Image (cartoon, rainbow, N blue to C red):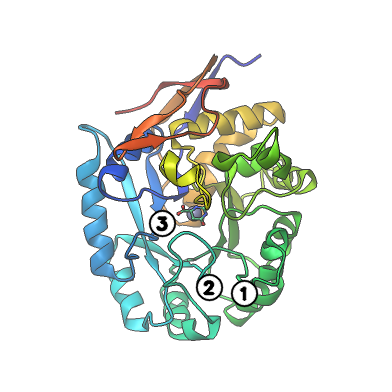
């Protein structure tokens, strides 16, 4: 059995870092493991323009532990009013690597998101011209649609027509959760990719109700069936370059999760690459991990692959029941239960 795993240093292509004390609590977990991360813009208020994104970037850099080498790759939050000029400004800044489409009402802090895709025409035209990728939260918000069907309906109603309307636009279908999404990406035109989270690879929807309600496994899109989970593993096993690592690590304080109306989000940054290693080992596809974690995402974003390495050792450890978080507690994925791989060394 492999005991040590050396990997080109990975990147996280979908991450929620929050702000202020919460940012300071979670950022060190990511900067220890990942060289770069695509940082989601769903703050309150959201990061809707270049000035806000550059200021947020500075706050992230100031919150880094001393000596850490980590590059936040910023994103813009698209609204019904994002102009083509704003996209040009974002692109010219050199610090913004994508624009995020949240359908209004789909998830945490998405109220200011897009109500009708037709309103995005000026922004999409500009993004296409500048080759700035569109990052998509792929769920319809129609309350009539079953919560487990919202990703599949989004493909038919929004994503497929969008990909056809803008054939040159590069698109990342974020946190895919269903066979329908996997099939869409695999059969799509060039320029369409997807990120895959650890929780959707580890769990199916039964886990949400195992022995009682499990708020710490509640995220959006919600966990799906076992058949869907297996479908997510197929492109990873095949080394499909269109599928790459994006944790969607999304911290919320324990009190906000364990509530009559609990927030959506799974926190995984404390053990992200370790959990992916465990998944790839369980599937007997460990040799595929480096491409997924450290290469395909960089290639898609047209950024250089990292040149340094991290090393993991096969030595089980258990994360604590919680970490301190902004005056409260943060319950991590796999809290108090063993994870097969431990991070052994990483550059500063
Ligand atoms: O579970 C989720 N949490 N899904 C999202 O899309 C947003 C995220 C968050 O920001 O908490
Ligand atoms: Zn997210």
Q: Does the residue labelled 3 lie within 8 Å of ligand 2?
A: yes
What is the number of the mark on residue 163? 1
**What whole-number distance in Å separates the C-alpha atoms at marks 2 and 3?**
20 Å
Instruction: Rate crowding at label 3 as few (under 14), some (14 to 19) or many (20 or more) other CA atoms within 10 Å.
Output: many
- Residue 87's place in the image compared with 174, above or below, is below
**What whole-number distance in Å separates the C-alpha atoms at marks 3 and 1?**
22 Å
Q: How many labels does the image show?
A: 3
Q: Mark 2 points at which residue?
A: 169
| Residue 140 as seen in the image, left or right of residue 115 | right
Is residue 336 something that shows in the picture?
yes
Q: Where is residue 183 in the image (x, y as percent from the top left)?
A: 75, 59
SS category of the residue bearing label 3: loop
Q: Name the residue rendered at 47%, 23% in the picture.
A: 319
Q: Name the residue under label 3.
A: 40
Work out whether residue 129 or residue 226 is closer to the camera in this orientation and state it. Answer: 226
Q: Name the residue rendered at 49%, 44% in the picture.
A: 257
Q: Which callout, 1 or 2, points at the residue further toward the start of the chain?
A: 1
Q: Which callout, 2 or 3, points at the residue further toward the start of the chain?
A: 3
| Residue 182 as seen in the image, left or right of residue 175 | right
Outermost front residue? 260
């Amino acid at each position: 059995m492999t005991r040590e795993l050396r990997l080109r240093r990975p990147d996280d292509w979908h991450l929620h870092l929050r702000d202020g004390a919460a940012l300071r609590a979670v950022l060190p977990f990511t900067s220890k493991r990942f060289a770069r991360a695509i940082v989601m813009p769903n703050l309150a208020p959201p990061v809707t323009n270049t000035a806000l994104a550059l200021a947020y970037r500075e706050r992230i850099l100031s919150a880094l532990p001393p000596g850490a080498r980590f590059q936040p790759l910023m994103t813009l939050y698209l609204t019904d009013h994002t102009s083509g000029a704003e996209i040009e400004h974002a692109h010219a800044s050199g610090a913004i690597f994508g624009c995020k489409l949240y359908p209004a009402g789909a998830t945490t802090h998405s109220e200011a998101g897009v109500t009708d895709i037709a309103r995005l025409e000026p922004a999409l035209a500009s993004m296409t011209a500048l080759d700035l990728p569109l990052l998509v939260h792929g769920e319809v918000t129609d309350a009539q649609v079953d919560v487990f069907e919202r990703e599949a309906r989004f493909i038919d109603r929004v994503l497929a027509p969008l990909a056809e309307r803008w054939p040159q636009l590069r698109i990342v279908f974020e946190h895919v959760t269903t066979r329908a999404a996997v099939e869409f990406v695999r059969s799509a035109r060039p320029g369409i990719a997807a990120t895959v989270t650890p929780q959707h690879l580890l769990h199916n929807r039964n886990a949400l109700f195992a022995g009682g309600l499990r708020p710490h496994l509640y995220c959006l899109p919600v966990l799906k069936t076992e058949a869907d989970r297996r479908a997510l593993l197929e492109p990873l096993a095949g080394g499909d370059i269109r599928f790459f690592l994006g944790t969607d690590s999304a911290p919320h304080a324990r009190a906000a999760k364990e509530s009559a109306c609990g927030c959506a989000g799974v926190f995984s940054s404390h053990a992200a690459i370790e959990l992916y290693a465990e998944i790839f080992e369980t599937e007997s596809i460990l040799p595929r991990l480096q491409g997924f974690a450290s290469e395909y995402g960089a290639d898609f974003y047209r950024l250089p692959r990292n040149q340094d390495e991290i090393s993991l050792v096969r030595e089980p450890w258990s994360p604590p029941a919680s970490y301190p978080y902004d005056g409260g507690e943060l319950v991590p994925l796999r809290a108090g239960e063993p994870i097969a791989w431990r991070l052994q060394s990483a550059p500063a």
